[in-house]
Image (tube, rainbow, N blue to C red):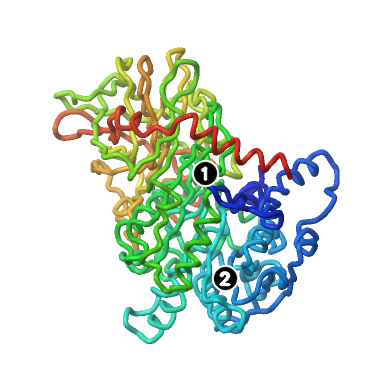
Amino acid sequence: FSIFTMVSLLLFVVFGLFLSNGIETDSHSRSIYNALEYKYRASLAKNGKSPKKSLSESLTAMGATEQTVCIITRDNICLSTQVWTPAKELHKPPYDVLYAKTPYGKDSLDADAIVAEPMGWVFLAQDVRGRGQSNGSYSFWRTSGNDTLDTMEWVLTQSWSSGNVGAIGVSANALAQYADLIGVTQFPVGSKEFDHYDEIFNHLRIAQLFLGDGMGWHTVYQGGAYRTGLISGWLDDLHESGTIQEVQEHETFGPWWYALSGPYQDQWKWLNQTIIHFAGFYDIFSTPQIRTALAVNTSAQIDAQGKQIIVVDPGGHCPMGEIFWPNDLYGFEFIEYWGIPAVDSAFKHGDNNNMTEFDIHEFFPFNALWYQLGPGGNGSIGNYWVQAESFPPPTDTMFYLNSDGKLSTSTQSTADSTSFIYNPKDPVGTHGGNNLILQPCGPWNQDVVEKGRKDILHFTSDTLTEDMAFVGELRVNLFVESDAVDTDFTAKLIDIHPNGNPYLVQDGILRMRWRDTATWTPGVYQTSPSAPMAKGQVYNITIDLAFMSFIFNKGHKISLSISSSNYKRFSLNYNSGNMVIDGDKDWKNATNTIHFGSDKYPSTLILPIVDLQWLEDRKVSQEQIDEVHNAVQDYYNNQ
């Protein structure tokens, strides 16, 4: 499953359906549903057949006209942009604008133009800088904010423009749009430049961003560890391998990252738009996207605060793991069901200059819709959708690491420790998790990579006597020691089934040279490495695993695996104190130690436990799922 395949499958149906109670559609506006033609075309391509008509030919047949223009940026770069204008005999200016940009070639966005045309919107499909027919060098989204604002400024000068812009994006395309706000906040608040670009950016009325995030450095260096499988794998697939070295040369957070992460801790308070954020618990951008949405919802301007919608499906980019997820497409189909009327309403409020009155909840009667994961199997609890005003209030529950591999809600009275040798030339492999290029992804049996190894410590609870649900951020607090100046500590949360099979729930890592701030906290960065580890000194660290939902079922066991590698999900730490760009120079084995027990070393797994009845009370009914699914499928089948 390549990055392009995944992006295409999602992007071509983002605005797939315009369905609601009582909304009339004539034969022409039914062409909205032609966006779903891609599914038909993709299935034909798999069988070696050619589709009858290209998407661009379909657009032309609908009366739309296309012109490729060169939008010149402030630094004199040409951004190659297709401008699709709706059939003039049916739609008169001024036109609202739907805008998307991509590194995969702007022709890949034709299906979104098919969505925009019958609504009477202009659609802009743009090659990002340095890709396709756009000039300049590929910038790894670092020029995205400036380029979007320059594009919007061009739109506002066009005689046909209404002044309303909507943004859409999936994956790499969504990352580009999440970075747009930095085009404003890079300037001092109150400066001439800030006020100018803030006014332009506020013409963005709404955005639908799927499977991306706004936390650049954290996404690339999770827990301080470079994500080899994702970043190097994706850039290689994109034929932009030269960018790998540049990214690795900037392991330390600094100005190079400002255009992606923002130099200010409060950047999100300047956002003034509703965004529909679509994430996945096993997605490559999962936690940073959820954190981005939550940060915006609580700290943004009046037209954005409390108006962010977060939908989290099981997998995101990950189509499936070893556990079946029933009804997993419901969240995506719900957005297909209501996405276009929501955008249309936002544009109408923009016409009247009253975005404060725009209420996304007329279309999305919740702030959060998520998939409550579980172990799967007959009679198990979990794997259902929950719709609520927010994520549930959690109670952090401590599970203490004890001697003899025990995991308990109480700590032992005496201090103890266990050590293992980490050899970076014989790392623990990756099998499942939040992967894309690296496969497999999702929940998989960890015996494949863990069984028989002596460099993994296991701590396991007694058999659960009742179901236990959690929603929120998983953390592992450890007291650690090493004879190396730098090393990694990894953690995996595992669900042990009654038959003994250990299935991955989530994992995380902390690279000790970034131990002071390498957490999922937006706006918190470390601008120089931590001091080298001192032999014999014990360090208290926190490994952030993920924002996750799950239900541990009665009869199962909770288990925690601690080690120092998870490769190729994360780059190897060679225990030398050198940066990732230095490779295995001066590599050595490390003897790593976990301390636990007593008030001195209370190493713990921290689970955000929630009330199971709270979840059940907000569970989406099968009737509602079927209603949306059947309506969507009816239109799939009629194309």
Q: Is 298 left or right of 209, judged from the image as shown?
A: left
Q: Residues within 10 Å of mark 2 (few under 14, many from 20)?
A: many
To which residue does mark 2 refer?
96
| Place of residue 310 in the rendered image (x, y in percent of width and height, measured from the top left) | 42, 49
Query: In percent of the image, x 80 and y 56: which residue is there?
Result: 54
Residue 116 visible somewhere in the drawing: yes
Q: Is residue 538 above or below residue 531?
A: above
Lower sequence index among marks 2 and 1: 2
To which residue does mark 1 refer?
334
The residue closer to the viewer here, 100 or 214, is 100
Disc on res. 274: none
Residue 480 visible somewhere in the drawing: no
| Place of residue 531 in the rendered image (x, y in percent of width and height, measured from the top left) | 29, 55
Query: In percent of the image, x 31 and y 28: which residue is there?
Result: 612
Q: Name the outermost residue toward the bottom.
A: 192
Amino acid at circle 1:
Phe
Amino acid at circle 2:
Asp
Query: In percent of the image, x 55 and y 74: which residue is there?
Result: 147
